[in-house]
Image (cartoon, grey):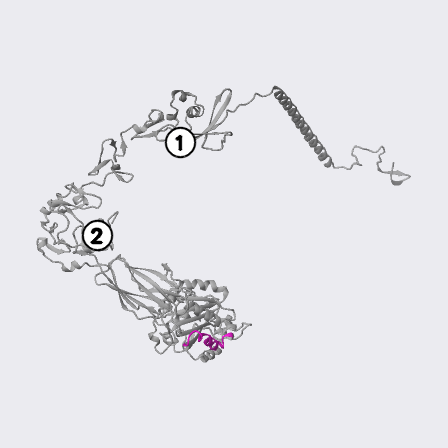
Amino acid sequence: SEGLNLCTSGSATSCEECLLIHPKCAWCSKEEFGSTKSITSRCDFLQNLIANGCAGAIENPSSSINVVKNVPLSSKGSGQTHLDVTQIMPQKVALNLRPGDQTSFQVQVRQVEDYPVDLYYLMDLSLSMNDDLDNIRNLGTKLAEEMRKLTSNFRLGFGSFVDKNISPFSYTAPRYQNNPCIGYKLFPSCVPSFGFRHLLSLTDKVDRFNEEVQKQKVSRNRDAPEGGFDAILQAAVCKEKIGWRKEASHLLVFTTDDVPHIALDGKLGGLVQPHDGQCHLNEANEYSASSQLDYPSLALLGEKLAENNIHLIFAVTKSHYVLYKNFTALIPGTTVEILHKDSKNIIELIVKAYNSIRSKVELTVWDSPEDIGLTFTATCQDGLSYPGLRKCGDLKIGDTVSFEVAVEARSCPAEDTSHTFTIKPAGFRDTLEVALTYNCLCGCTGHAAPASGKCSGNGTYACGLCECDAGYLGARCECEEGASGDMHHAMCREAEGKPLCSGRGECSCNQCLCYESEFGNIYGPFCECDDFSCARYKGVLCSGHGECHCGECKCHAGYIGDNCNCSTESDGCVSSDGQMCSGRGTCVCGKCQCTEPGAFGETCEKCPTCPGVCSTKRDCIECKLFNSGRLADNQTCQKHCKDEIITTVDVLETDDPNAVLCAYPVNNCVMKFTYLELASGKSNLTVLKEPACSSAPSAVTIVLAVIGSVVLIGIILLGLWKLLVTIHDRREFDRFQSERSRARYEMVSNPLYRKPISTHNAEFTFNKLNKSYNGTVD
């Protein structure tokens, strides 16, 4: 019981409360238990109670399991005693559960060989299924031949559906009453629409199936969706009329080429009453509530199919496969297969679906109480365990799979409460009944003694404690409430308004009895003190340098602070050069706190960016490599340069961004080096073997460079001038061309040119010899 003790920290005041805290908590019912100065918790882990002297008087009930009925699994299904076939083991168990204490049991399931099969064929007879109807007229014979290869006991039934015969789902006008296909050129004659019609009860006379199919004619509804879910529900719940056998595997084959109507679609036709899940077949075996009840929901379908152990096989066209595949996730024990548009593959489809159903086992749970937790672990044919899985696949007929079922009660219901729930494989008639009772009472509670002398005659003694009568208090009910009782309580409070005994003890008349704690001692007249509630440093109480007294650290010599983590020593702050923190920080609690930007190290001795660092490193290089310089003269090189790692190179690399480049003059040359501070606290110095020296530039080179520069600049300026002139000339020429194109006259007819001869015409009238003349004079 390391860490927090859940049992003692739960403050249980009775045995029953203790059992609810944790399944490993136990209760000590011994009368004399613990010391008189403190209260030893009676609710604790079993080993702690034994260690504290409570052996032989411990209440620690546990969950138990009892297998009530365990008939062995059968190996073959068909025979004279079908009802004796067993496919699940055990068949009944009884569990007695303590809250929180998980118990488990094994369940085995086997798909037995040659198990009887009842198959009900439910067909969509809407107009689009006319070609399908032609192809299944001899289905019974062929299907029986194939199914008898899988089982010697096979029965076949038949039913059909279209949709509700109300608007807007079907044609309801008077002219369509007898023939809803009137006016439809492709198929002018069909039967009236209907919801569901049961045509043939399950029988082993397959010729009757063929006869009934040959009698059928298609009908016509108005909208695309069909009323198939109405038909499925009636085929599932009308057990007597359909003829489902208890001892057989039930298959319901649903064939359609369109989507179904679902719950709430009926509101379009004024149907607001939800489906009641009951059988509504009249004497003519037709669904009589088609025009009164809404379509059933997926949840209702799944419930009724599971109740009647029916495997539903959706045989649908490829275009609707995805929709019905999604339905299978919501309806347990359901499969879906793709049906050809003319239903030619229906036999192959049914056999494939049957083999698929028989190749898997999935457990379902019915009527599980809300306060019960169930977990499953499947062990399939590969021998591996799959936690959280309740199904197995890829099985062969006769294979056995097992499941571990773990059950846990989360709480205690009312006394004498019992529950029952059922575990059953989907589509099987076999079930496992689980009966539950709750182990919530302590055995010592049944030996309670009212008005016991152990309780001063003022209370009931049970499980080692006194439950005082009204008006009395104290560990032995020795104190009386009222004025004296208030006074006793006041003596157990540190101040007015504070809890009794600081909430960490019990007031026995006028004295606090402090609880025991796994963390340490609780003490004080009001249980106000302890030796474990002081400040900690890195999880250590008082940093390990002090003692905890009543919530306060009393530090040892040489340490100060609330948690005693601050040392008064300063020896650790002195650097190798004798300075306090190398002159780059202050000594706080025995450690250097560097104040110079870029400084680090235990004594702030590292500082790549500090002024003068290159000078310090230079001293180490000179004394170590050349035995010269300031440190060599003082013979202190080894002391100051012990952390310097010096390497000489021919070419100095300066690519490392963390390395600092330094240089200093040597005889008209420059000595260069880089240094890098390592995580170990040492410095890595990389130095050139020889100083870098450079020669003075030639005078001729300088003159030639100046002349070349002047000539180059002149050429560039001339080029720029020529470019500007060319640009200007082109602009002027473009402007001339533009003005020329805008002239309004021809080149041959200049308006400034005038001919040298001009002609004028003048009209006049005169009389000569009393005659009038009109003429023209040039």
Mark 1 closeness class: few <14, some 14–19, many ≥20 residues within 10 Å: some
Q: Position of residue 132 (x, y in %)?
A: 51, 72
Q: Is residue 193 left or right of residue 98?
A: right
Quarter of the image with the C terminus is: top right
- The part of the image, by quadrant, that contains residue 94 is bottom left
Which three-letter amino acid code belongs to the residue tagged 1? Lys
| Residue in the picture at 35% in, 67% down | 109
Task: Calculate the distance from the C-alpha at mark 1 to the C-alpha at mark 2.
Answer: 55 Å
First-in-chain label (1 vs 2): 2
Camera-nearest residue between 210 and 563: 563
Q: Residue furthest right?
A: 769
Label 2, residues with CA under 10 Å away: few <14, some 14-19, many ≥20: few
Q: Which span is picked out in magenta?
A: 135-153
Residue 73 visible? The answer is yes
Q: Nearer the viewer, residue 392 or 603?
A: 603
**x, y percentage for residue 469?**
12, 54
Question: Callout 2, which amino acid?
Answer: Gln
Read off the residue under disc 1: 682
Q: Viewed as shown, does residue 84 lie left or right of 176? A: left
Tell me the residue at 48%/21% (across/down). 665
Image vertical order of residue 766 relative to residue 8, above or below: above
Which numbered circle lies on residue 47? 2
- Look at the image and tell me whether residue 611 can be seen: no
Q: Write down the quadrant of residue 24 in the picture.
A: bottom left
